[in-house]
Amino acid sequence: MLIAKTIAEARAAVARLRAERHCIGLVPTMGALHQGHISLVRAAKATCDAVIATIFVNPTQFAPGEDFAKYPRRLEADCALLEAEGVDVLFAPDPEEMYPEGATTFVEVAGISDRLDGASRPGHFRGVATVVAKLFNIVQPDKAFFGQKDGAQVAVLRRMVRDLNFNLELVVCPTVREPDGLAMSSRNHYLSAEERQSALVLSRALRHIEARIAAGVIESARLMDVGLAVLAEEPEIRLDYLCIVDPETLEDVADVSAGALVAVAAAVGPARLIDNLLVPSR
Ligand code: AMP
């Protein structure tokens, strides 16, 4: 696996791959890799001829006072994992490489960037859209792989790809969970044993809502009541939002139909955790 630290090195590596291989897959991450990330790498390996992974803790998507400084950084262990998966190139730039002095251009996906996580993390999706657009321009992949776990991020990036005419396919992979249901996240490292137990209430609330939908309930208001009652079982979590929205616009829906996004976010101890489910077709 070639490790590129600079944009020039990454571009040269991609050019060499492109000369001999057809389909290039990109897997952007912030590192501290877990099986959720690895599932994206495997999906890319399965459908592309070459895979570029990126590890970059992107400062512009963290608001002041958030966990940028303490976000887990484990480059050596991550390299070993990616190497074992057969990744061709790892692009792991420093912040100064991605944002040199005087960089003032940002990508703003207006409207949906202010909903869900964007409402409680001002500027978050502007930072995400900007860094992903930069990675798309640097690597120019044929396919880019993202996790459904970040459901609002998927909506923002889909819109960006459409609006800015990026010539690539955005592939969304299912959320990978721990055996007890907790969605895998690099931020799970922040949790104590008790906090981790409390955090299970997020996926439990989603499962209860899913069961009511399977039983025929479609009114969002009733489904919200079910979810909020479950979340109230863990009073020490600090709920940010529970909502049922259109997966493209992130606008609330009154009644659920197939594809609707049921999303939850809460702070558990020092960690802000998110989870969601896509309503299956019946
Ligand atoms: P992150 O490193 O948290 O920025 O995540 C990098 C990519 O991995 C994003 O596309 C995430 O949606 C995806 N991802 C993170 N956690 C999971 C998970 N548990 N299952 C599937 N994909 C995930």
Image: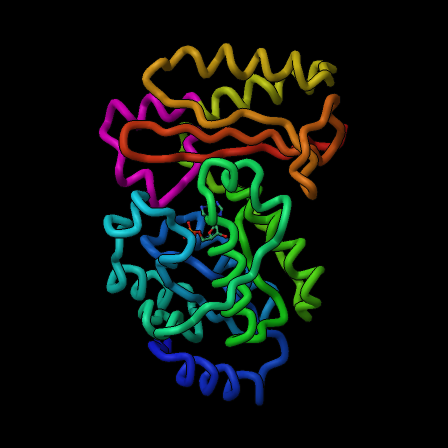
**The N terminus, quarter of image:** bottom left
Q: How many marks?
A: 0
Above or below, comparing residue 173 to residue 3 in the picture: above
Residue depicted at x 50% and y 88%: 16
**Residue 18: image location, x then y, percent:** 57, 84
Above or below, comparing residue 168 to residue 270 in the picture: below
Residue depicted at x 57% and y 46%: 113
Task: Identify the image quadrant of residue 107.
Answer: bottom right
Q: Which residues are magenta?
A: 181-201
**Residue 213: image location, x then y, percent:** 68, 19
Horizontally, residue 203 falls left or right of residue 5, namely: right
Residue depicted at x 50% and y 39%: 117
Horizontally, residue 222 falls left or right of residue 188, namely: right
The reply to whether the magenta stretch includes residue 194 is yes
Residue 90 visible, this orientation: no
**Residue 29: image location, x then y, percent:** 42, 58
Above or below, comparing residue 41 to residue 124 in the picture: below
Residue depicted at x 40% and y 84%: 9
Horizontally, residue 8 falls left or right of residue 148, namely: left
Residue 50 visible, this orientation: yes
**The C terminus, quarter of image:** top right
The reply to whether the magenta stretch includes residue 233 is no
Looking at the image, what colour scheme do you see?
Answer: rainbow
Task: Identify the image quadrant of residue 4.
Answer: bottom left
Secondary structure character of the magenta stretch overall:
helix
User: In the image shown, does 17 or 169 lie closer to the viewer?
Assistant: 169
User: In the image shown, does 229 or 106 lie closer to the viewer?
Assistant: 106
**Residue 80: image location, x then y, percent:** 30, 64
Task: Identify the image quadrant of residue 146.
Answer: bottom right
